[in-house]
Amino acid sequence: MDGSYKLESFTDNKEAEVARLKYQVDLFYEREFELYKKIGLKDGMNIVECGSGPGFLISNIVRDLPRCTATAIEVDPFLVDQLTENSIVDGKKSFEVKLASIYETEQPDNYFDFAIARLVLEHLKEPEKAIAEVRRILKPGGCFVIVSNDFAYHLLTYPQIPELDKMYMSYIKSRFSEGGNPLIGRQLPLLLRKGKFEKTDIEIICVHSELEGDKAFLKAENVNISKSLVKEGFLKKEVLESLIEKWYNMLQQPDHIIFRQLFVISGIKGSDTIGKHKNTKYNDSARSENQSPGLRSFKGMTSLQKESELVQFFVNRVRTIMDQQDLQLDPDTKLNDIDIDSIAAAELSGIVRSDFNTGISISDILQKFSLNDIVKMIVNNPESSAVNQKKMVSEPRGEFLEGEL
């Protein structure tokens, strides 16, 4: 499978990498497992882990939820061998092992209750394709949990080590060059929504050396990755040497700290007909409230009549944008005084520009304009549709459609 996690690029010693992956799971597992249960994981469920690696996470889960039926999917043959070995506990198979890609899991439709992809999507060229495949194999109402890094927020220390930032920036460039996205953590709620998952949520799990001790952190890190970055030309050798020296000095400080976090993003498989965010402001009710009774023409109207027509339109639009249909709005009131936020101001500015060919800055809307001020600018603008006698009709985005009278 194409992507930025290739075992040979992470280490020259595969067995050592497998050991590191175990420490990485152990470092977060206690908090991670509690979060899975909070999200909806229960004993007796049919669960799947896509991109299981050696299988340390799925092994822990079936140990702690022994009535679960579990399947582990992995694409790397070496890791599948490790996975198969780890699936046998006391001579019994504790979960199924499948050699397959997260893009094509070879699992039945609507089959699993709970799916996990841990530290996988950040390495994929096509995360949307992976999300679609996981959705296919989940039952309606099934839960998908993605555990991911965002390497703008990774391992931190006290005393601070500036070279760590340089190393992670080099790592980011390296993974992007290989087709991965080490900054994907911030994008995943959006990707889940686009993939027709509902009730999307995000949590952050933090671990701290004061609570976990140093050993867990040191075992979970891999200096071979930094060496590979030097070898590939992404990181200067002297930066790595300085990093190693400062890391050693940091560990000698009695009050030193190592701190790291993971992002946990979850969503529920929704119906195929749902593609909108639960908070979208342009739903059917908002659309009907903004819809004009029919085509309205400015032809023959006085300036005062045009202004009255536009004021009512913008009152309705602001109510919809701010999601406050009962908002009492005086057209002379400065929009700043009704606590309009920057997103709403940007949306209002866009409507004025696209529908009336009139430019009004977001800062002016936030700082000094009322609806009457905006309407007067539109009416007095020779380029606006209001002056040029165009027809207007309010659509879901409030467009005023141009047409011949």
Image (cartoon, helix red, strand yellow):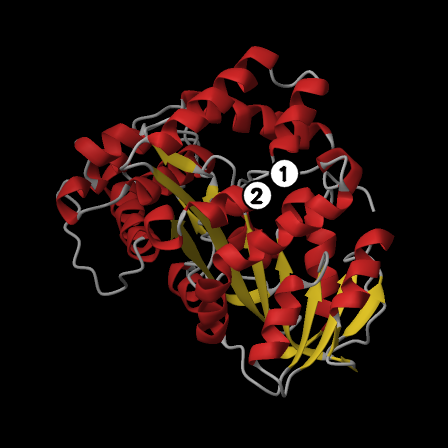
Q: How far is the residue under mark 1 from the one under mark 2? A: 5 Å
Q: In this figure, which residue is indicated by the disc labeled 1?
A: 181
The reply, left or right, for residue 153 in relation to residue 322 is: right
Q: Point out residue 221 in the picture as x, y percentages from the top left corner.
A: 56, 40
The amino acid sitting under disc 1 is Asn
The reply, left or right, for residue 234 in relation to residue 217 is: right
Cβ–Cβ under 8 Å for marks 1 and 2: yes
The local crowd at label 1, few if under 14, some if 14 to 19, many if 20 or more residues have their Cα within 10 Å, is many
Whether residue 401 is visible, yes or no, is no
The local crowd at label 2, few if under 14, some if 14 to 19, many if 20 or more residues have their Cα within 10 Å, is many
Q: Residue at x 23, y 35 (%)?
A: 366
Q: Is residue 146 above or below residue 377?
A: below
The amino acid sitting under disc 2 is Ile
Q: Is residue 349 above or below residue 147?
A: above
Q: Point out residue 356 in the picture as x, y percentages from the top left corner.
A: 42, 35
The reply, left or right, for residue 187 in relation to residue 347 is: right
Q: Point out residue 149 in the picture as x, y percentages from the top left corner.
A: 54, 45
Q: In this figure, which residue is indicated by the disc labeled 2?
A: 184
| Mark number, residue 102 | none
